[in-house]
Amino acid sequence: MADHQLRADRDRLKVTFDTVADRYQQARPDYPDELYAVLTAATGLRPQARLLEVGPGPGKATIPLARRGFRITCLEPGPQLATVARRNLAGFPGVQVVQHAFEDWQPADAARFDLIFAATAWHWIDPAVGYRHAWQLLKPGGYLAIWAAGHVVPAGGDPFFQDLQDVYDEIGEGMPASAGFYAPGEQPDDRAAIERSGHFTVTRVRYFDWEVRYTAAEYIALLNTFSSHIDMTDGQRDRLYGEIRRRLAARPDGTVRRHWGTVLQIARRRDEPVAAGRA
């Protein structure tokens, strides 16, 4: 697929989340507490450090870090998501939600940040802009942290999603031939892209995995927060969700186990960037 088509699809899909702003906080899983402990230990951050979050959504990853006493500026381009985030973060006076895209944002006071982080949001950022702009907004020695929750399939895991692929194929939403199911600790990461940018040096990579059990209603609510499912036609969703209800109703407990995995990648700002691709 041509680069311009990839960019067009990315720009179209990334705004779909704003239509499900009220559902996102409840339906999406929390990240493991240990992730935040590793992040703060690896970066040496102390309370009152200045953090910038890229794409907070309703504040899923913001709240655990706000509780640790950090001052956080959140850049959320979606107006509905920004409204929900302000409501969810109202109890933290050190947190500010700004409705603005990351790529061309500048702080009013020209201050720089100790850490820029993105939780399941960095893949929506244009890589030609993202790393350079993050470097510009960070203090010398500052850090960039990226992680994203995705589907993993451990040994002995629930095969429900794989078994459901015949329905996805039927409605024209099958997985690309190049896609696959990753075991925990084997999912791809951004290390090469981070280093290739020439602006950062990767200092820590850590894998996490966990499991959440869903009823049919809860699982469908989760799927309704994924851009690919939001973008489906009503007919596609009706066929898929009807089959999910039917198949889970046939299970003794009526539930599905969803296995989640994420890769925390922490990179330190280079004092001076090097030519892209030569890092």
Image: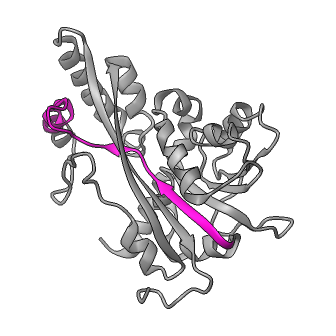
Kindly tell me whether residue 11 is visible in this rendering: no
Image quadrant holding the C terminus, namely: bottom left
Q: Nearer the viewer, residue 141 or 247?
A: 141
Q: Nearer the viewer, residue 226 or 198?
A: 198
Q: Is 28 rendered above or below residue 208?
A: above
Q: Is 54 rendered above or below residue 194?
A: above
Residue 95: x and y in percent read: 76, 44
Task: Tell which residue pokes out farthest to the right in this image.
Answer: 109
- Which colour assignment does the render follow? one colour
Q: Is 80 rendered above or below residue 269?
A: above
Magenta span contains residue 159: yes
Identify the residue shown where x is 36% and y is 26%: 220
- Asked whether, in this view, residue 54 is left or right of residue 125, the answer is right
Q: Is 27 rendered above or below residue 175?
A: above
Residue 187: x and y in percent read: 28, 54
Identify the residue shown where x is 43% and y is 77%: 195
Q: Nearer the viewer, residue 165 or 111?
A: 111
Residue 227: x and y in percent read: 42, 45
Task: Tell which residue pokes out farthest to the top in this image.
Answer: 252
Residues in magenta, as a range: 140-167
